Image: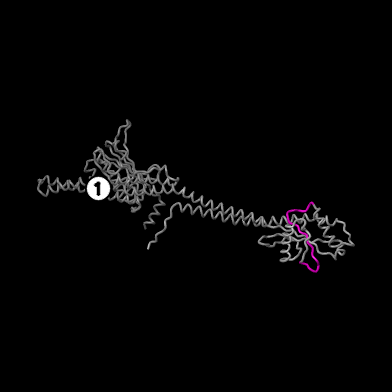
Amino acid sequence: MRKNNIKLPIAIHLYATFLIVILMMALSLLFISRNIISTYITQECNKRIDNAVKSCQSLAETFTSTELDINNITDSDVGNSLLNAIVSSADISNEATIALIYTNEDSENTYNLLWPTRSYSISSYNATNHVLSEITTNNGISVTGENQTINIDGSIFFYRMLGIEFSPEKNVYEHLSNYYIVLFVNSRPYYSLAESLSSALIQVVLIIIILAGLLSLFNSIPLFVSTRKLSEFSKRIGRGDYRPINTENTASRELTDLSIQMNNMAQKLEKSDLEQKTFFQNASHELRTPLMSIQGYAEGIKYGVFDNEEKDKAVDVIIDETERLTTMVSNLLTISKMDMAKSGDYTVKKTLINCQELAEDAIDKVRGHFIHEDKELINDITKEDLYIYANEPDIFRMLENIFSNCLRYCKTRVSFICQKDKSGKYIDFTIFDDGPGISEDVIDKLFDRFATGTAGKHGIGLALAKSIVEEHKGTIKGYNLKDDDDSVKGACFEIMIPLVTKKDQLTKLNQES
């Protein structure tokens, strides 16, 4: 069974396209920004720790320059000296929080906080003490010389521990506690800013999605109107209404081009429809005339209207009209075949034909008509070995129709020339007579079907000749021959059909075999 596909409106297609692009861009930005921000935060926090470590060198110099009584030094003296060094040092970096702690030898992971003091800031003391408690509980007190991280209450802290060495008289201070400087940075403000940016990006994306919906609706309305307009136009064409549509109000260049092409198509269909109707009308008229003559003379013979002598004439008329009718039907069938070949519904069978033999056979075929009309047929046929790729009966019919046309209007003679043209690429069939020439009223529509001639007759002989020539990739033209004084001295028909080269001859012979 055939499945029914869901047909979505243009607005949905546009909105879906906008939405996919927006979401892909948003996800890409989120992914890239998070990676970039995470890397930036890590680098920035490490940089701040490193800067704080460098600033602590001045603290060490301040502390070592402090005058202490080496013989009676106590932990209290060292602590006070260190605190004084911190307070008095102007080079201590504020890029990281600095904490000063000391431990006893019997309890390595239990510390005492010297800085910041409660008197300095209770909030700073409590916050620093909380961070140090988490660090010592989870990672202990260790001097690694590298920055480390720890997650405290969902925030990443970067920290480093620095040990304070009492050298060079280390043995003098062995009874004292171990002193450490802890430097740490809370990365939470950075991540809070990143989350704020992500939230703002999400809000912007939602706003853009809404705007994209409105934009897609705004853009789709003209497209919808234009496509509906073209759809209605195509329906009108199907009903035989070929009136053109206005192409100025279409939504896009492509639809404008489409509407222009549809207008052109409608014009061609209208012309073709008119030609077809005219063709059938004229064909009916042309067929009716000989049929009426045949019927009239046949009934006259049946009912004894004619005597013996007139009866013979009536029989001759019936035979002539029958031949005329047969020729006309044959021409109609051939021109219909050419039309089918032009549309691709029929393939004309072609073979290699010698031009000299073709021309001589055509002369032999029409010579009897010239003898019967007491007219002269002059020919000049090339002796070169030239070939065309063609359908021989169609070429014969084409030449015969032109000979018949020239024979009808010539005074005394018709000339036929068959030769290679100047370019050497075509065979030139030229047929001309010494008659009154082609009327100026007819010359522009000479090869139209059932064009009316000077005698008021309709025909398709020349139209058929043009169709056959075009099927063989050639050209045909009709014009008047003129004397030096610009007076008309006859009609001329010139037919050019492509010659086949030696290489193409071999190829086509191989294909036919």
| Residue plotted at (87% across, 57% down) | 67
Q: In this view, does 226 lie above or below 153?
A: above
Location of mark 1 (residue): 328
The residue stretch that appears in magenta: 90-109
Q: Residue furthest top?
A: 485
For this view, does 100 lie left or right of residue 326? right
Q: In this view, does 110 lie above or below 357?
A: below
Q: From where the camera sits, is residue 428 visible?
A: no
Instruction: Residue 478 in the image: state x and y as whole percent.
Output: 32, 40
- Residue 51 quadrant: bottom right
- Residue 58 quadrant: bottom right
Query: Quarter of the image containing the N terminus?
Result: bottom left
Q: From where the camera sits, is residue 234 visible?
A: yes
Specify whether residue 437 is painted magenta. Answer: no
Q: Front-most of 91 and 145? A: 91
Instruction: Residue 195 in the image: state x and y as whole percent.
Output: 62, 56
Specify whether residue 97 is painted magenta. Answer: yes
Q: Front-most of 343 and 311? A: 343
For this view, does 401 lie left or right of residue 113? left
Amino acid on which the number 1 mark rests in the picture: Met
Q: Which residue lies furthest to the right in this view?
A: 71
